Amino acid sequence: MSLIKFNFSFIEKEVRKKTFGILNTLNLDGTPHTTGILYGVSKPDAEFALYLLTSRKYRKVRNIQRNPKVSFIIPFPHHHLRFVPSGAITLNGVAKLVPVNSKNIIEIFSEKRILKMIIADIDFNKNEEYVFIKIEPDPKILCYGVGFSIWKLRGSHTEGGYFVTIPSEK
């Protein structure tokens, strides 16, 4: 484990900077199903959660209906030094399906340009094809390399692994 200590506030800021992550659900036979997806984050003064927009027709929705346990990974690639391993934040937790006309989630998606683009053509009052997925993360967030310089990791890549805990008030 790393001697450097990062806290939830730091990780929350990093999660809020991004909009892309990888959702992992379990298929009926127990095998993993993995898909890349855009996400939004709850308002800073609300309970910490992630929100994803998807169609009800996709496997991830059926998988969540059967087993709500999910894992969500947010990659932090090194764009200029592609040979350096990416950092990552992993949130494990429970997913819930939320109606697409949830105004507070629509507001969250309206705050970032890329998320605003994906909701632009949806009639939230009539469209039942879409649904939001709310991920309520477990308190322990696993991290690798986020906040470290590549020079720090150069000596020992195992030093980059750590976890932070979501405070009970979040």
Image: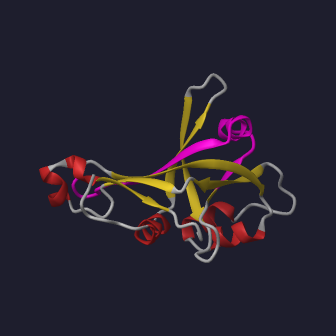
Residue 38 percent coordinates (x, y): 56, 55
Residue 22 percent coordinates (x, y): 50, 47
Q: Choose between 81 and 12: the one closer to the eye.
A: 12
> Residue placed at 75% from the left, 60% from the top?
122
- Residue at the limit of the structure toward the front, as seen here: 168
Q: For this view, does 2 lie left or right of residue 59?
A: left
Residue 138 percent coordinates (x, y): 56, 53
In the figure, 29 relative to 169: above or below? Answer: above
- Residue at the limit of the structure toward the left, as seen here: 155
Q: Choose between 167 and 125: the one closer to the eye.
A: 167
Magenta-colored stretch includes residue 74: yes
In the figure, 25 relative to 22: above or below? Answer: above
| Image quarter of residue 31 | top right
> Residue placed at 47% from the left, 67% from the top?
12
| Image quarter of residue 135 | bottom right
Is residue 84 at all visible to an observer of this figure?
no
Q: What scheme was used to colour the molecule?
A: secondary structure
Is residue 12 at all visible to an observer of this figure?
yes
> Residue placed at 69% from the left, 39% from the top?
58
The quadrant the C terminus occupies is bottom right
Stretch of the chain drawn in magenta:
52-81
> Residue placed at 42% from the left, 66% from the top?
14
| Image quarter of residue 8 | bottom left
Residue 131 percent coordinates (x, y): 75, 52
